[in-house]
Amino acid sequence: MSGAHPNLTVVDHPLIRHKLSYLRARTTPKKEFKELVDEIAMLMAFEATRDLPTEEVEITTPIETTTAHRIRGKKLVLVPILRAGLGMVDGVLSLMPGARVGHVGLYRDEDTLQPVEYYFKIPPGAADRDFLLLDPMLATGGSASAAVDGLKRRGATSIRFLCLVAAPEGVERMRRDHPDVPVLAAALDRGLDENGYIMPGLGDAGDRLFGTR
C-alpha cells in the first residue's frame, strides 16, 4: 500500500518495470503493445489474487496420497471496461482459465461529462463472486468509479480494480467513492495534463491496442 494512497498497491517488480518501459514507448508497434499488455496483466494477476482463500484437498500423486491446496470459495469474474480493458483479459485468463468474463460499456456524455452506461453483462449471483475490474488506465477515475457503482448495484461485494498506469487523481477519486475497493497498478504516474491524459502515461491504450490512432 502507498502511504499517500492507502487504497493503492503498486505491483513493483523488475519484469513489470522492464515491460512497462516498452509499453510506454511511442515506437512500440500494435502487435508488441498487445503482447506487453497481456504479459503485464498476467504478472499483476499474481498480486491481485494473493489473498484468495484455499482449502486442503486429498490427492493421489504417482507416488502416494498427500494433502494439497486448491482455491475455494467465491468464483472469479473478470470484467473489462470496454474497450481498452479487453486487452488485459487474455493475460489474466492464461493464469485462471476457469474465470468467467463480464463486460462493462461506458461513454462520456458530452453535456454533463459524466460516464453513461450503455452495456453491462456479468454472470448471475454477483454476491457470491470475486470481481477483477480491468482497465489499462486510471486517469480521472470517472469510468472506474461508475463501473464499480454498476457492479455494486447488481450485488457485488468483493471487487478489485486492476490497471497498468494510474494517475493520483484517479486513485484519489476511487478512494473517495469506493474506499472498500483496492486499486492495483503497475505504476503510479505524475498526474494528468489539461486534456485528462496521464503523464508520462502511454497514450490512448484503446487506440494503441486496436490500431485506431
Image (cartoon, helix red, strand yellow):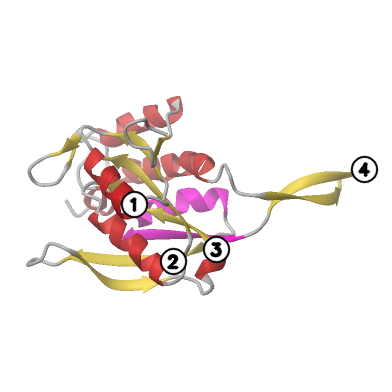
* Nearest-to-viewer mark from 4 and 1: 1
Question: Horizontal and vertical percent for residue 47?
Answer: 51, 39
Which circle's residue, 4 or 1, is located before the other in the chain? Answer: 4
Residue at 60% over, 60% down:
74
Callout 2: SS = loop
Question: Horizontal and vertical percent for residue 142?
Answer: 23, 56
Asked if 45 appears above or below 206 in the picture, the reply is above
The numbered dot on residue 102 is 2
Residue at mark 2 to residue at mark 4: CA–CA distance: 40 Å
Residue at mark 3 to residue at mark 4: CA–CA distance: 34 Å
User: Disc 2 marks which amino acid?
Assistant: Gly
Residue with the mark numbered 3 = 129
Residue with the mark numbered 4 = 64
In the image, the segment drawn in magenta is 74-96
Callout 1: SS = loop
Which circle's residue, 2 or 1, is located before the other in the chain? Answer: 2
* Nearest-to-viewer mark from 3 and 1: 3
